[in-house]
């Protein structure tokens, strides 16, 4: 489905980002992976290459604009351009509004919102020049409804990502660039593996389908939005959350 397409995935070291990178590669795309842990990125890039496509990796802090510029420049040099950008890098904190340190608020905004903006701004000139592209931002159900386990900064940052997604979709539509977001709900991860049984049952009680999602299921939604099947979809924030939030 994505043969000869060239992709960048930020925040790909593990979890949802890693699953996205592998699913894009399985669909035929060349994939550059970004993250903060070089050893994990090297392993992932080798796994992608073993699928028969080109791979590359770059480490850096998405809060720094130069990281995005370097990633796009490297992908353009190695692949010849970028057709697909997936902005997945993100962090969370857990504290109440009154307990939250302002430095924590700023760091979450810098990574989740500004990091997304940096990568979008870095990739858009090339997409405009080539006449099109697909951008998929990984947001959260928390962007649409409050959750007691997420700090205010996390939900606010992801709500801002949703607006940025819709704004870019409208602005970039004349250039053939489609911009959408995926809003995952509770997903099996390193973090959820640490939950005790009581807390897991309380989370599951809020999921209509009765189970957590998997990183691979989120990745499948991203691949759809990155592929030709979504060529009449832009500006959407797609819920992939087992029914925990419906609109």
Image (cartoon, grey):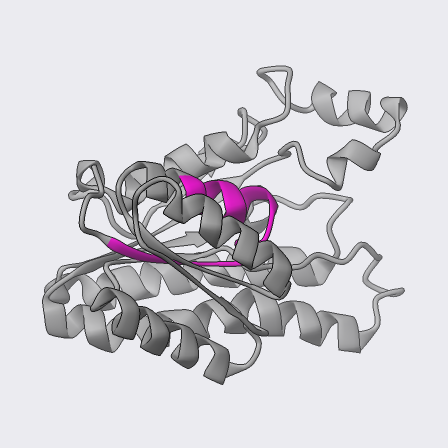
> In which quadrant of the rendered view does residue 73 lie?
bottom left
Give the residue displayed 16% in from the left and 43% down from the top.
232
The magenta stretch spans which residues?
Answer: 6-22
Give the residue displayed 74% in from the left and 27% down from the top.
203
Can residue 12 be found in the magenta stretch?
Answer: yes
In the image, residue 101 sits, relative to residue 199, either above or below, namely: below
**Is residue 139 visible to the viewer in this orientation of the structure?**
no
- Does 4 sit left or right of 179 as displayed? left
- Does 114 sit left or right of 120 as displayed? right
**Is residue 193 visible to the viewer in this orientation of the structure?**
yes
Q: Quadrant of the N terminus?
A: top left
- Does 37 sit left or right of 200 as displayed? left
Residue 62 screen position, x and y as percent: 54, 72
Residue 8 screen position, x and y as percent: 37, 60
Question: Camera-side residue: 233 or 128?
Answer: 128
Give the residue displayed 64% in from the left and 19% down from the top.
211
> In which quadrant of the rendered view does residue 103 lie?
bottom right
Can residue 178 be found in the magenta stretch?
Answer: no
Give the residue displayed 35% in from the left and 43% down from the top.
24
Residue 139 screen position, x and y as percent: 51, 51
Identity of the residue furthest to the bottom in this view = 66
In the image, residue 31 sits, relative to residue 123, either above or below, namely: above
């Amino acid at each position: 489905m994505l043969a000869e397409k060239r992709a960048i995935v930020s925040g790909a070291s593990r979890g949802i980002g890693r699953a996205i990178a592998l699913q894009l590669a399985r669909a035929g795309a060349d994939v550059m992976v970004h993250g903060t842990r070089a050893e994990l990125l090297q392993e992932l890039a080798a796994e992608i290459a073993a699928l028969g496509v080109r791979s590359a990796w770059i480490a850096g802090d998405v809060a720094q604009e130069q990281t995005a510029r370097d990633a796009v420049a490297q992908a353009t040099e190695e692949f010849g351009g970028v057709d697909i950008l997936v902005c997945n890098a993100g962090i969370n904190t857990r504290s109440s509004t009154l307990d939250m340190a302002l430095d924590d608020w700023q760091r979450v905004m810098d990574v989740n919102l500004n990091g997304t903006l940096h990568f979008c701004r870095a990739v858009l000139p090339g997409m405009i020049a080539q006449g099109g592209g697909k951008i998929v931002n990984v947001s959260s159900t928390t962007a649409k409804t409050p959750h007691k386990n997420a700090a205010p900064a996390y939900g606010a940052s992801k709500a801002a990502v949703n607006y940025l997604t819709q704004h870019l979709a409208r602005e970039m539509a004349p250039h053939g660039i489609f911009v959408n977001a995926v809003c995952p709900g509770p997903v099996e991860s390193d973090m959820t593996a640490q939950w005790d049984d009581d807390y897991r049952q309380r989370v599951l009680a809020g999921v209509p389908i009765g189970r957590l999602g998997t990183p691979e299921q989120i990745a499948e939604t991203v691949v759809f939005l990155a592929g030709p099947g979504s060529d009449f979809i832009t500006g959407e924030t797609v819920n992939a959350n087992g029914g925990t939030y419906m609109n």
